[in-house]
Image (cartoon, helix red, strand yellow):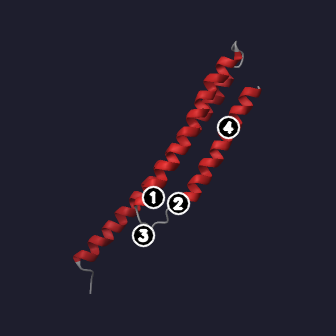
Amino acid sequence: MGKDSNEMAEERTDWAEDRTLLANERTFAGWMRTGMACVALALGLRAVFGAFEPTWVAKAVATIFIIAAIAIFWSAQQNSCKANERFTSHDAKAQTKTRMTVLASILTFGAVATGVILWML
């Protein structure tokens, strides 16, 4: 016979929890994109103000955006991992804390390397 109303309610609750986990991943990805936009803005400042004197001013402003990117990466990682801990995955496969940490680490390394290169130019 079919499912009773309690089973159907539990199933809908499980699906809602899975949707929330997936929404958390989309939010994490959005914040990663925002951080990358800060890095791109830093590079764009270098391109626009390449001949700006004194050069350290343009580099310092670009560095602000590099630092903002790093803060965004790690804030997103921490908030996303906290959200994942509060929910249980049912049918959806959520990203692991390790995967989010590795991604934030890689993007941080890239942002720092970009900042170093900007100062060397």
Local SS, label 2: loop
Mark 3–mark 1 distance (CA, rounded to whole Å) = 12 Å
N-terminal of the pair, mark 4 or mark 2, is 2
**Residue type, label 4:** Val
Task: Identify the residue at image location x=63%, y=28%.
Answer: 63
Q: Residues within 10 Å of mark 2 (few under 14, many from 20)?
A: some
Disc 4 from disc 2: Cα separation: 25 Å
User: Can residue 25 be seen at all in this image of the molecule?
Assistant: no
Where does label 2 land, which residue?
Answer: 95
The front one of 9 and 96 is 96
Residue bearing the label numbered 4: 112
Q: Are marks 2 and 1 in contact (CB under 8 Å)?
A: yes
Element under label 1? helix
Which badge, 3 or 1, is on the more N-terminal residue?
1
Question: Which residue extends farthest top?
Answer: 53
Q: Is residue 54 left or right of residue 30?
A: right
